[in-house]
Structures are given as structure tokens and as C-alpha cells.
Image (spheres, grey):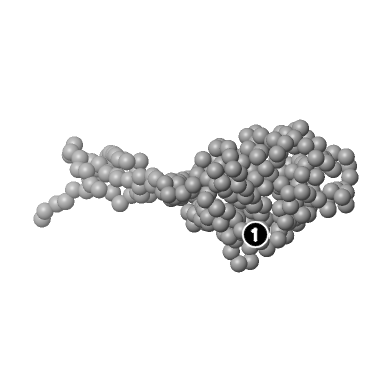
């Protein structure tokens, strides 16, 4: 009869590779030799390599924004090749993003300076701790709603003229706007104009709630003949504010400066300030077409 010998395991050796992913048990057969046998034991579970997280939502949004800005700049450069000179600046209050094309170039304000004069009048009254007087409002209303020049000259003089408005500009953060006695020839930039528009609504800015409300009401109720420019980009149901400016001088060979500044608002979805400045237009009408086209391009590419 054949006999079988039962051996006792003397040694068990365990080898772990990869942090517990692969284990072999070495078992002694009692004869001094060892065989390595795979073990089903898994101490640490699967050991996959870390998966890259990829760009954050903020990084993706920034990349998309830069892409849109680049496309807009290309479109504006193309328009520049066939149009009179212009500049534009846009500020999205919701995101805090600002875009500008030739935004630091100075242009004559023409009548958009009237929004600036209005802000300075409101600040002057705040400093005196009083509401705007009836006589001031009787000038401010036609100045903004009808772009009345005589009312503007009277109010400009009433609040202190060039010296007072220049001093006021510092409080409004307008660093590249140079006021002159012939107020329509004041020089400004598109960047400065969106700063002004921001101060007209900034709850932490120099204008108090009553002043901001007064400015909004006047710039939101301009005469129908004055609601071109920025209003052209407002969609149905959106609110807008606007102040336009246009002027022609013999010194410019009869060519026109045509400007538009304002805001487009739709609850929490849209709150954007736009300033488009231009000069050397052949007519007021062609200048209006230009500034509206530029404003529409900003909305098309920036997607606000």
C-alpha cells in the first residue's frame, strides 16, 4: 500500500506589489523548496492612477471670454478699415468684466457731457444736504431728455462751470476727461464714459440713492428722437438709459462727431454699460448707423 505523508506548513511568505494590488504566497512544502502561488487576497482594492481634474469652471469661462473678445476685436478692426474712426468700451456689471477697443483715445464729447454735468449737479446738491431745486430740475430735464443746449449752458454755469466740473470729475473717477468752457468740446475716452455710467448706479459710489434714481429717470425717459444709439441693442422687455451726442464744426471740415453712452438692463440677467465714440462721420445719420453697428457687434460677440 502506498503511503502518503502529510506535511506541516512551516513558512508562509507574502509579497505585495503596487500597494496591495498583487499578492503571492510562498508556501513551504517541508522539503526546503517553495512555490509561489497567486493569492486572491487584495488588501487595498484597485489602485487606479489619479484622474486629471481638468480646467475649473472659472478657467473655462475665462477662456471663452477671451475667445469672444478676440473675435470682437477682429470684427471691429475689419469695420475700422472701411469706417470713420471710432472707439468703444463695455462693462458687464454682473461679471465685472470690461472690454475696450481703442478705449483710451480721446474724442469730443458733444452732448454726452450732459450726463456728466447732471452727475455733478446732483453731487453739488448732496454736498449741500439738499434736494435738487426746481430751477435746477427745470434745466436738467430738457438737458437730458431733449439735449437742450441753452439749458445745458445755464446749468453748467450754475454749478460752477469748468472748475467745478473738473473737480467733480475726480470724484467720479474720470481721469482722461478734460473739461472746457465750450462744454461740447470737452475731451473724453470710452473708458472714462463707462466709469461715469458705473458711478451713476454704484451703491458704494459718491451718488446717493436719490441721486442715482434721478439720473436713471432722466436718462430712461429721453425724447423719442433721442433714443438711438445704445437703445438699438436693447431687446424686447429690456430697459435702457441713454445720452447721445452729435456735433459738426467747420474746423472739422463739416464732418460729424457722433457718440452714444448708456446701459441695457434686464433684471439680474443683463446689466451692461456701453460707450461708443466716433468722429469724422460724413453726416449725423451715417454716424448713428456706425455707432449702432459697433454697439450691436459688442452684444453679438460678448453674448450679454
Residue 58, position as x, y percentages in the image: 51, 47
Which residue is rendered at x = 45% and y = 46% of the image?
80
Which residue is rendered at x = 77% and y = 48% of the image?
150
Q: Is residue 177 left or right of residue 283?
A: right
Q: Is residue 115 left or right of residue 55?
A: right
Residue 104's image quarter? Answer: top right
Q: Which residue is mark 1?
A: 227
Which residue is rendered at x = 35% and y = 47% of the image?
48
Element carrying mark 1: loop
Q: Is residue 112 left or right of residue 62?
A: right
* The N terminus: image quadrant: bottom left
For this rendering, which residue is in front, 190 or 86?
A: 86
Which residue is rendered at x = 61% and y = 58% of the image?
228
Q: Is residue 270 left or right of residue 16?
A: right
Q: Is residue 298 visible?
A: no
User: How many callouts does the rendering have?
Assistant: 1
> Dot 1, how many residues are within 10 Å of its Cα: few (below 14), some (14-19), or many (20+)?
many
Residue 146, position as x, y percentages in the image: 72, 56
Residue 29's image quarter? Answer: top left
Residue 24, position as x, y percentages in the image: 27, 44
Amino acid at each position: 500500500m502506498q503511503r502518503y505523508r502529510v506535511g506541516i506548513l512551516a513558512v508562509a511568505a507574502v509579497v505585495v506589489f503596487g500597494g496591495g494590488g498583487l499578492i503571492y504566497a510562498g508556501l513551504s512544502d517541508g522539503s526546503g523548496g517553495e512555490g509561489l502561488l497567486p493569492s486572491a487576497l487584495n488588501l487595498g482594492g484597485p489602485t487606479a492612477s489619479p484622474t486629471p481634474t481638468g480646467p475649473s469652471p472659472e478657467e473655462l469661462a475665462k477662456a471663452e471670454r477671451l475667445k469672444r473678445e478676440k473675435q470682437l476685436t477682429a470684427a471691429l478692426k475689419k469695420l475700422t478699415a472701411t469706417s470713420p474712426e471710432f472707439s468703444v468700451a463695455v462693462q458687464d456689471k454682473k461679471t465685472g468684466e470690461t472690454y475696450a477697443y481703442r478705449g483710451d483715445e480721446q474724442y469730443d464729447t458733444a452732448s454726452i457731457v450732459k450726463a456728466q454735468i447732471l452727475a455733478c449737479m446732483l453731487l453739488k446738491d448732496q454736498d449741500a444736504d439738499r434736494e435738487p431745486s426746481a430751477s435746477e430740475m427745470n434745466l436738467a430735464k430738457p438737458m437730458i431728455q431733449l439735449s437742450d443746449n441753452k439749458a445745458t449752458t445755464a446749468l453748467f454755469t450754475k454749478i460752477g462751470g469748468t472748475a467745478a466740473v473738473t473737480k467733480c470729475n475726480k470724484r467720479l473717477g474720470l481721469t482722461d476727461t478734460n473739461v472746457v468752457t465750450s462744454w461740447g468740446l470737452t475731451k473724453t475716452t470710452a473708458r472714462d464714459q463707462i466709469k461715469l455710467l458705473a458711478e451713476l448706479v454704484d451703491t458704494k459710489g459718491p451718488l446717493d440713492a436719490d441721486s442715482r434714481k434721478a439720473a436713471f429717470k432722466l436718462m430712461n425717459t429721453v425724447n423719442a428722437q433721442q433714443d438711438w444709439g445704445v437703445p438699438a441693442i436693447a431687446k424686447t422687455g429690456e430697459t435702457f438709459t441713454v445720452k447721445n451726442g452729435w456735433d459738426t464744426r467747420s474746423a472739422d471740415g463739416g464732418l460729424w462727431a457722433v457718440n452714444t453712452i448708456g446701459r441695457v438692463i434686464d433684471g439680474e440677467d443683463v446689466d451692461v454699460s456701453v460707450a461708443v465714440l466716433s468722429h469724422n462721420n460724413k453726416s449725423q445719420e451715417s454716424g448713428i448707423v456706425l455707432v449702432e453697428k459697433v454697439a450691436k457687434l459688442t452684444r453679438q460677440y460678448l453674448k450679454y
